Image (cartoon, rainbow, N blue to C red):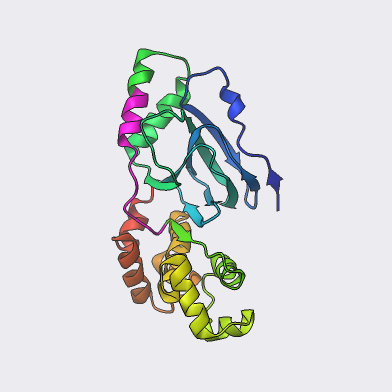
Amino acid sequence: MNTDNSPDLTAGEGLPLPVVIRTQVERSTRLAYHEHPHHLTVWATSATVTVRTDSRDWLVPPTHGLWIPATTPHAVDVLHAGDACTVAIDACCPIAWDEPTGVLISPLIRELITYLHSHPDPHHTRTHIETVLLDLIEPTTSTSVHVPLPTDPRLRTIADLLIAHPADQRDLAAWGHEVGAGVRTLTRLFAGETGMTFARWRTQVRIRAALTHLARGSSVGATARAVGYRKPGAFSDAFHRVTGQSPSIYLANRG
């Protein structure tokens, strides 16, 4: 696995915030835990990346961005190579979210970010664009782009393995044998540490993984099989429950 430093935000030193940094990222690149003095919006324009904080594991597919508040420790893994964009925003801006927040990157937001990247020098038009961009950034209604991470070491083992292999079909009894804990204990811990049942948490993991496959253009059927669903209909139902839309609609709108 390639290991790299955090994005070089000094590339825009001396320029007014927001500063837009565009980079090409390679698969399996990992950025160790780090933090920045600025707010960041991470947008994988054609790549797919995950961002991990102490308590959550976030997927950032090309259709979404992730707002990371200033001084928030986070690590980044690149699942699929492509282009990525980081927007550094002044920590004194009006947005006051105190934890990482998923945002939908609409076509208009894409164009505004592109304009800021193409026009880095101070100008009254740029100032207006910055204001409009901050006004348009809103939390996504979908919860599928993040998965709460448990802290109990037994649950964390299960969580890490399922995030890496979402099609794993083992139930809690089998996982209990793997980590040395009873079903009742694991059930109680999952509810207490993630706010979800094990079944619901695993569904979140699978739908989050499905977003990666769909963003790459995989068919609904192939995506369903890749994340552990034997029948496309069951996958479509789960996808709709989590995201509020069908996978076919998401696939059609991914660009």
- Extreme residue toward the left, this view: 244
Quarter of the image holding residue 199?
Answer: bottom left
- Extreme residue toward the top, this view: 123
Q: Nearer the viewer, residue 245 or 66?
A: 66
Q: Residue at x 31, y 28 (%)?
A: 132
Residue 133 falls within the magenta-colored stretch: yes
Q: Name above or below for residue 244 compared with residue 22.
A: below
Specify whether residue 222 is in view: no
Q: Residue at x 64, y 53 (%)?
A: 28
Total residue callouts: 0
**Left or right placement of residue 159 versus residue 204 in this view:** right
Specify whether residue 187 is in view: yes
**Left or right placement of residue 28 versus residue 132 in this view:** right
Residue 242 lies, in percent from the top left, at: 34, 64
Residue 61 lies, in percent from the top left, at: 46, 51
Q: Name above or below for residue 135 compared with residue 56.
A: above
Q: Residue at x 57, y 45 (%)?
A: 73
Residue 144 lies, in percent from the top left, at: 40, 59
Residue 204 lies, in percent from the top left, at: 42, 66
Q: Nearer the viewer, residue 36 or 227?
A: 36
Highlighted magenta segment, given as a residue range = 129-144
Q: Nearer the viewer, residue 36 or 165?
A: 36
Q: Residue at x 56, y 23 (%)?
A: 12
Q: Nearer the viewer, residue 121 or 40?
A: 40
Residue 119 falls within the magenta-colored stretch: no
